[in-house]
Amino acid sequence: MYSHTFHKRVRYGETDKMGYLYYGRYADLYEIGRVEMLRSLGLTYKNMEEKEGIMLPVKSLQMRFVRPANYDELLAIKTTLRHLPQKDIVFQVEIFNEKNKLVNGGSVRLAFVEMKTNKTVGAPEFLLEKLRPFFGVAT
């Protein structure tokens, strides 16, 4: 298992009339979480696309809203990979407020697509190489 936490403050322009983080912005937080998790492994979406020829389109997104996040609140976006990716990759996401209370939780599933052929492929070796040590798998 591999987890990474990234902090982000709720900005005024992200809130609704009630001062809550607008519900449509949570997908953005999920993206921030997974992008920063990959960056923590030394990978970036830009390099995966430009150098490796792999893109990661979203297949499904599930989330549940537990309590509101408020304007100017610092959120902790905890992103976890519970399983070593195979055909696709599933990021589990939990978003906590400053009191460490769960605000939102869910998951996002992405496919690995080879850009040259626009076909789905299995988890690329460059990613698995980075993740195996966290799952107790010898390289």
Image (cartoon, rainbow, N blue to C red):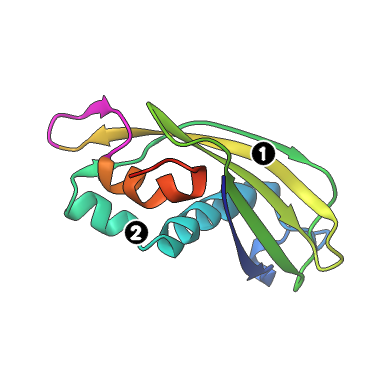
Q: Which dot marks residue 106?
A: 1
Q: Residue at x 25, y 58 (%)?
A: 47
Identify the residue under disc 2: 43
- Find out whether residue 122 is within the magenta segment: yes
Secondary structure at numbered mark 2: loop
- Find out whether residue 82 is within the magenta segment: no
Secondary structure at numbered mark 1: strand
Quadrant assignment, res 124 = top left
**Depth check, front residue: 115 or 92:** 92
**Depth check, front residue: 11 or 126:** 126
Q: Which residue is drawn at 53% across and 35% down?
A: 83
Kind of residue sitting beneath label 1: Gly
Query: Could you tell me how many numbered marks the image carries?
Result: 2
Q: Position of residue 49 (x, y in %)?
A: 23, 50
**Depth check, front residue: 79 or 137:** 137
Quadrant assignment, res 18 = bottom right
Q: Give the main secondary structure of the magenta stretch.
A: loop
Q: Position of residue 52 (x, y in %)?
A: 19, 48
Q: Which residue is drawn at 57% across and 44% down?
A: 1
How far apart in space, not on screen, are marks 2 and 1 (Cα)? 23 Å
Asked if 86 appears above or below 115 in the picture, the reply is above
Pointer 2 or 1: first along the chain? 2
Q: Which residue is drawn at 69% across and 67% down?
A: 10
Kind of residue sitting beneath label 2: Leu
- Mark 2 or 1, closer to the camera: 2
Question: For the magenta stretch, what is the residue range?
Answer: 116-124
Q: Position of residue 114 (x, y in %)?
A: 21, 35
Asked if 139 appears above or below 83 in the picture, the reply is below
Query: Would residue 43 be found to the left or right of residue 107 on screen?
Result: left
